[in-house]
Amino acid sequence: MARPHVVGVVGSLRDGSYTRVAVERALDAAAGAGGKTELLDLREYELPVFDADDREAGDAPELTRTIREADSILLGTPVYHGSYSAPLKNALDYCGFDEFENKTVGLLAVAGGGFPITALEHLRSVCRALNCWVIPHQAAVPRARDAVENGAITDEGIDERVARLGEEAVQYANIEPDPPCLESTENVGADD
């Protein structure tokens, strides 16, 4: 069997992004578990605000191709106002069932405060609407400025959770998908 291809999407545009550090750590663990990994850094893509009349705008074809070719996808986001970031939302809007249906997806949120859970819940809902298989384990990095230093996660428990997410992205990359969920059958916008 071929090595599972795991793509980690960084939903932050900051140069010193803690989210990037966490996604890179998850990808390192995925590589250690036998996966072939790729970092998809949204800073490197020209993605205008999504317009359904221009799905091929900017670097959208490259973005969607990369996601479509993945076996597992790790979505990493900073937490903004209790939800996930606008750059990640915009990137996801360019995608649909062709990119995500029946894919394994892992979720990771990084917060300046102590409660990054709602962003993970929002991403889980999006993934359900795209009929993904979302890894039950999710990783959160609360109080990121205290947990990340010099490009590495310094909190042992957080590091272990983030690494576990990467390992499970490989472990479950080829899991038999569930039948379509109600959310995905009602998500007509993703297939337009």
Image (cartoon, rainbow, N blue to C red):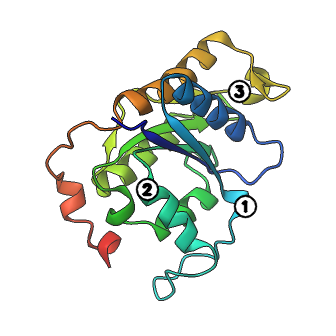
The quadrant of the image that shows the C terminus is bottom left
- Label 2 sits on residue: 69
Q: Position of residue 152 (x, y in %)?
A: 76, 24
- Label 3 sits on residue: 143
In which image quadrant can residue 112 be found?
top right
For the residues labelled 3 and 1, say whether their Cβ atoms are less than 8 Å apart: no
Please identify, in this view, whether the residue under mark 3 or under mark 2 is nearer the observer. Answer: 2
The amino acid on which the numbered mark 2 sits, given as a three-letter code, is: Glu
Is 165 on the left-hand or right-hand side of 109? Answer: left
- Label 1 sits on residue: 44
Between 109 and 81, the residue placed more toward the observer is 109
| Badge 3 density bin: few <14, some 14–19, many ≥20, Cα 10 Å | some
**Dot 1: what SS?**
helix
Q: CA distance from mark 3 to mark 2?
A: 34 Å
Please identify, in this view, whether the residue under mark 1 or under mark 2 is nearer the observer. Answer: 2
Mark 1 or 2, nearer chain start: 1
Is 70 on the left-hand or right-hand side of 177? Answer: right
Mark 3 or 2, nearer chain start: 2
Q: Position of residue 119 (x, y in %)?
A: 51, 43
Between 161 and 140, the residue placed more toward the observer is 161
